[in-house]
Image (tube, rainbow, N blue to C red):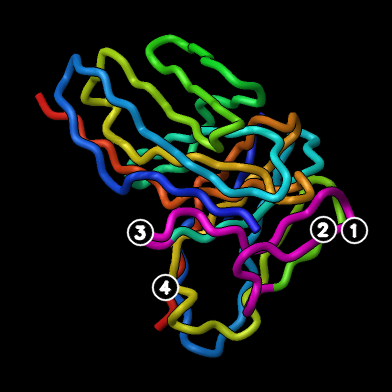
Amino acid sequence: NAGVTQTPKFQVLKTGQSMTLQCAQDMNHEYMSWYRQDPGMGLRLIHYSVGAGITDQGEVPNGYNVSRSTTEDFPLRLLSAAPSQTSVYFCASRGKPNEQFFGPGTRLTVL
Amino acid sequence: GQSLEQPSEVTAVEGAIVQINCTYQTSGFYGLSWYQQHDGGAPTFLSYNALDGLEETGRFSSFLSRSDSYGYLLLQELQMKDSASYFCAVHNQAGTALIFGKGTTLSVSS
């Protein structure tokens, strides 16, 4: 099993550009989430999904969209990138209620 | 909503014991989890407590008191490789996603 994979690993955007961060898992997990991590702020929940076709907002959803057309994939879209979205983004999936697996992260810089 | 409080930094020496505390406020409680993250890496699962008491896994133990909304992670026989950030986490109100604290940076010196 590859676990949770994320692409790209690094990305630089200009203000106003849009892009999609990809996330996939091969563990047949129902629960998937996106987090952003900034220094001193911990991991903040952006959006999450409890299954294909079902998504919901987390703590910091503004400026981001998600969709879940399959169990495996959970892409995160930045509609119009802003410097405040410079961060490290982690995708995670969870099967059992008590263990969450994280992808390796995407380091995004918005100029 | 959910909120968690944990110390921002803890320092210790090799071979020592360190305790990282976590207090939480949540409208629906499903359990307290702990994750470890090394610099530049992804968080990895350490432990989960749904019931009161101590859970032991090797050098690491985790404790929960639901009546006090409090838990801690206990690391024994500290090694240099234990230098990392440690996060406590609780489920959101619906139990469908994890909410994390801001993390505690542990520095282990020789």
For the residues bearing labels 2 and 3, Cβ distance under 8 angstroms: no
* C-alpha span from label 1 to label 2: 5 Å
Residue flagged by tag 4: what amino acid is it?
Thr
* C-alpha span from label 2 to label 3: 30 Å
Residue A68: which numbered mark, if any? 2
What is the chain letter for disc 1? A
User: What segment carries the magenta color?
Assistant: A38-64
Assign a secondary structure to mark 3.
Answer: loop
Residue at the disc numbered 4: A109
- Which residue appears farthest toward the bottom when viewing the image? A16
Residue B3: image location, x then y, percent: 55, 53
* C-alpha span from label 4 to label 3: 18 Å
Residue A53: which numbered mark, if any? 1
User: Between tags 1 and 3, which lies in front?
Assistant: 3
- Which residue appears farthest toward the right when viewing the image? A53
What is the chain letter for disc 2? A
